[in-house]
Amino acid sequence: MDLDLLRTTLEQAGEPGYRFDQAWAWQARGAADWKAMSDLPAPLRAKLGESVPFSTLTVTNEALSTDGTLKVLFETADGRPVEAVLMRYRDGRRSLCLSSQSGCPLTCTFCATGAMKFGRNLTTAEIIDQALHFRRIGKVDHCVFMGMGEPMMNLDSVLAACALLPDLGITNRRTAISTVGWAPGIDALAQQSRPIRLALSLHAPNDALRSEIMAVNDRYPISEVLAACDRHYESRRRMTFIEYVMLAGVNDRYEQAVELASLLDPKKYKVNLIPYNPSGSPYEGSSRGAIDAFRDTLEAAGLGATVRLTRGRDIDAACGQLAAKALAG
């Protein structure tokens, strides 16, 4: 919902200020439409229904996995594709993966979104409307900005959305922003006060390999990015999660695990190894044995490491795949 439009509409109608708080509270609790907002006068609900779209996004496709993961393709008012995912876990967690841009300008070679034409930054309303869509399905409690786009290139809108997420049930301590290494954004995140977690998509232990698979490394090499993460740690005293997608024969060898461990201070970093979801790229995912061996090598060096649970592999789980299919069709 465009909250600026909602506030302006209410003010122009001469409504008291608390009407805005009432309408937003209903949205944040998962109200299905204006009619559900029973403590707003019926004439006002009718006016809002005519003047303020309930969402800035339209659902164009959905895919439901056998493991409960729900992936949704939205379209903005100007026809831009946006993807978001709800991941349901056995322990009761309901985690969202949200997008910050339509497409992505950074063209990482293993990423389906990177193969798309970049559209534009999303507005705060378009970001929060992804979360509100899933809130209308049920409760949500975790969020990561790891969908389409580079969040640090649209940080003002992302942080504005983060300010609203607690009203939906997602505290900032359970919110993470994932970056491919946009160093100025990392420094900007360190200067704001919200306890949002930082995640770095590293995916290689040296500059030569990282530049080969992630063009952004030519602009912000590993040493510069880790220096920014160190500054973030000094400012916030919160560990950075290192995301490392496991690509067979590319970045999953023993010596690469040793090299990665030598880069990272165990007090400041924890590694999350990610099984690769095939996305039409030339890469194959590492075997489970290779992933486990890589993790064991990191842990033997004193570095904390986990393997991410695989979700939604039967529904084109790689970010950007639903949008790419829609555009191809």
Image: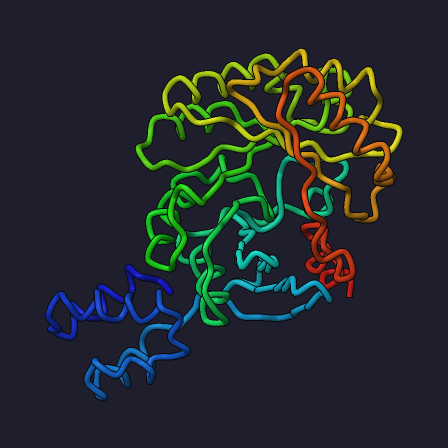
> Is 142 left, or right, of 17 in this rendering?
right
Residue 204, image x and y in percent?
Answer: 73, 23
> Is 29 left, or right, of 77 in this rendering?
left
Q: Is residue 160 above or below residue 17?
A: above
Q: Is residue 107 above or below residue 120?
A: above
In front of the other: 142 or 57: 142
Q: Residue furthest bottom?
A: 42
- The image's colouring method is rainbow
Residue at the image position 50 percent from the left and 39 percent from the top: 177
The image quarter in which residue 25 lies: bottom left
- Locate the C terminus by quadrant: bottom right
Q: Is residue 154 above or below residue 3?
A: above
> Is 282 left, or right, of 23 in this rendering?
right
Number of labelled discs? Answer: 0
Residue 252, image x and y in percent?
Answer: 82, 27
The image quarter in which residue 14 lies: bottom left
In front of the other: 229 or 101: 229
Residue 93, image x and y in percent?
Answer: 53, 56
Residue at the image position 50 percent from the left and 71 percent from the top: 137
Residue at the image position 57 percent from the left and 63 percent from the top: 79
Residue 164, image x and y in percent?
Answer: 34, 53
- Locate the N terminus by quadrant: bottom left
